[in-house]
Amino acid sequence: MAAGHSPMQQFEVHTLIPIHIGGLDLSFTNASLWMMLAILAASAFLVLGVKRDAIVPGRTQSMVELMYDFIERNTVGNVMGESGKKFFPFIFTLFIFIFFTNFLGLIPYSFTVTSHIIVTFAMALSVFALVLVVGFWTHGLHFFSLFVPSGAPAWIMPLLVPIEVISFLSRPISLSVRLAANMLAGHTMLKVFAGFVVTMLSAGGVLAALSIAPLLAGVAVTALEVLVAAIQAWVFALLTCIYLNEAIHLHDH
């Protein structure tokens, strides 16, 4: 991240290959490039991890097996049980894609795809659409009972039902904003601290000596961002499991 620029400049989308079809702008951008790189990196990681299938796994195989087992058993299995097995490929794909886009975004001069709400909202909308399909496919019109809290007195229903409906419809927004905001805030902080370091070093004298403070702060934020990158990928997968489980079991969850 170069100094002397706005901290928000790193999130700008730039056209790499202009493509216009029928009045639509389908240009290949830096966001498109880094999404493709994330898919290629994730595919290479998974393929190399299972290629040997050794009894005594190496580092890559161990990491792949650990991630696979963590999502299958500790996330999908714990939340959804047996009913979640058929959704595991979708949830694991979401997790891996977000995991790699988050981590690639930590590379200097890269592009953080998940810092853009349009990307995270598209993923959240796909989860929301799947929840609706599963809910109506499983329960038919009885799926609307999801908005009627069980055990609540009838006189309070006119107040609770609209609240439940609004809460349900806001899920794609909260799911997408949570991921995008975490990526945006962390990378902005990194850019600000990096700018402080360069500015103070350029000033010389006492300020140059004091530049160690923002440098250490930047290192700490970078370590935190590594943790956040993994946690946010898992949180997205976990909430997807919770929403799907709710659609399948309604008030039994």
Image (cartoon, grey):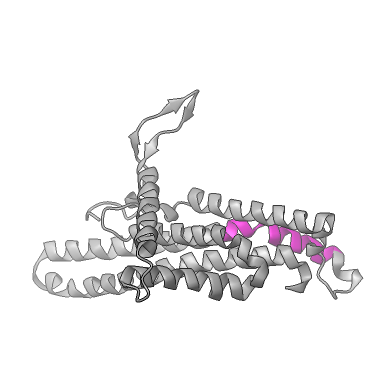
Question: Which residue corresponds to the image point at 41% horizontal and 62% vertical from the top-left?
Answer: 185
Indicate the position of residue 143 as horizontal and vertical percent values. Answer: 80, 59
Quarter of the picture containing the N terminus is bottom left
Considering the whole magenta stretch, tell me its main secondary structure: helix
Residue at the front extreme, as displayed = 55
Question: Which residue corresponds to the image point at 71% horizontal and 52% vertical from the top-left?
Answer: 133
Is 17 magenta? The answer is: no
Q: Is residue 119 left or right of residue 82?
A: left
Indicate the position of residue 247 as horizontal and vertical percent values. Answer: 72, 62
The stretch in magenta equals: 158-175
Residue at the top extreme, as displayed = 22
Residue at the left extreme, as displayed = 205
Q: Nearer the viewer, residue 8 or 105?
A: 105
Q: Is residue 49 left or right of residue 238?
A: left
The answer to whether residue 66 is above or below residue 30 is below
Question: Which residue corresponds to the image point at 22% horizontal and 53% vertical from the top-left?
Answer: 4
Quarter of the picture containing the C terminus is bottom right
Q: Nearer the viewer, residue 151 or 10?
A: 151
Is 169 magenta? The answer is: yes
The answer to whether residue 248 is above or below residue 20 is below
Question: Which residue corresponds to the image point at 36% horizontal and 51% vertical from the top-left?
Answer: 40
